[in-house]
């Protein structure tokens, strides 16, 4: 037990002085993970579209007596905005140790044939293109910095493995994130860049609030599904982020034990 306790302490200590960028940091999983990473000693960069929400996350970090974060609002669908974000990170910290690609969006749960092309593109741009753009800039920084390397963690979601009814845009992009994770893990290998993915099932956030009234199942039933606390997800992300670069969690699933995942679809 003493060795286990020392292991957890060293995991948190491993993040002291590390620079961590969290996208979608203004609410939900992004906020919870940002506060946990900062509490473990990391210097946080918070980004997302809504500055007011990011400032609320920054205040939560300050209340946790963690290092004050850098707040940089950005539209991750806009290549110029993403470039400006990473220029701020480099100008402020001169390096980036961890990128958590967390920002995501969904489309209305309507039949596939009723989705507009605008709804499809909005999800693809946010969930996939935004993650790609951030990863691209992170690779550039991590390759040239000294010491070389870093870590990228992608929020894949349970939908990276199997769909919910009427979720084609979200599910398609999350399956694509799995491909991005594998490609980055391979392409980053020679440069000491580790890439992994966390697939989260039913974390209780603003995004999953409608589930409290029940959610459609593949058999047509409406079911209230169990949820987990965001803190359970945050602990997993801190663990992934704190590993030495010689080790990597390629894929991890953190889910409500009783949720209908196995056999879904």
Image: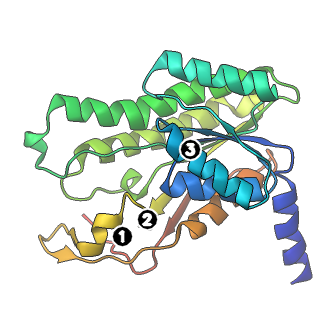
Q: Is residue 224 left or right of residue 143?
A: left
Quadrant location of the N terminus in the rendered image = bottom right
Give the total of numbered labels. Answer: 3
* Quarter placement of the C terminus: bottom left
Image quadrant where residue 32 sits: bottom right
- Give coordinates of residue 107: x percent, y percent: 25, 45
Give residue 103's position: percent from left, percent from top. Answer: 48, 42
Residue 137 tag number: none
Of pointers 3 and 1, the one earlier in the residue sequence: 3
Give the residue furthest to the bottom.
Answer: 1
Q: Residue at x 13, y 50 (%)?
A: 110
Residue in view at x 22 percent, y 77 percent: 223
Provide the secondary structure element on which disc 2 rests.
strand
The x and y percentages for residue 57 are: 60, 51
Q: CA distance from mark 2 to mark 3?
A: 24 Å
**Residue 154 falls in image quadrant:** top right
* Precedes in sequence: disc 2 or disc 1: 2
Question: Residue beneath label 2, please?
Answer: 201
Residue, disc 3: 54
Query: Which residue does the numbered mark 1 point to in the structure image?
Result: 261
Residue 240 visible here: no
The answer to the question of whether label 3 and label 1 lie on touching residues, with beta carbons closer than 8 A, is no
Mark 2 to mark 1: distance in Å?
A: 8 Å
Residue 247 is at least partly visible in this image: yes
């Amino acid at each position: 037990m003493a060795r286990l306790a020392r292991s957890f302490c060293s995991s948190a200590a491993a993040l002291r002085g590390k620079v961590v960028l969290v996208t979608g940091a203004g609410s939900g999983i992004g906020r919870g993970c940002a506060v946990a990473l900062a509490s473990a000693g990391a210097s946080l960069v918070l980004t997302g579209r809504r500055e007011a929400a990011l400032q609320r996350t920054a205040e939560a970090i300050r209340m946790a007596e963690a290092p004050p974060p850098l707040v940089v609002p950005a539209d991750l669908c806009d290549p110029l905005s993403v470039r400006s974000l990473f220029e701020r990170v480099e100008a402020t910290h001169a390096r980036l140790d961890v990128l958590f690609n967390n920002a995501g969006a969904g489309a209305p749960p309507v039949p596939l044939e009723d989705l507009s092309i605008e709804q499809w593109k909005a999800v693809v741009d946010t969930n996939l293109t935004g993650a790609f753009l951030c990863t691209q800039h992170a690779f550039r920084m991590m390759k040239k910095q000294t010491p070389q390397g870093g870590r990228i963690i992608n929020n894949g979601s349970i939908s990276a493995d199997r769909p919910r009814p009427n979720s084609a845009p979200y599910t398609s992009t999350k399956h694509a994130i799995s491909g991005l994770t594998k490609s980055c893990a391979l392409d980053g290998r020679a440069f000491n860049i580790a890439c992994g993915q966390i697939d989260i099932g039913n974390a209780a956030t603003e995004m999953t609030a409608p589930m409290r009234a029940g959610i459609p199942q593949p058999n047509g039933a409406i079911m209230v599904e169990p949820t987990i606390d965001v803190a359970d997800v945050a602990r997993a992300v801190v663990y992934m982020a704190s590993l030495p670069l010689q080790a990597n969690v390629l894929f991890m699933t953190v889910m409500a034990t009783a949720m209908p995942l196995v056999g879904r679809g």
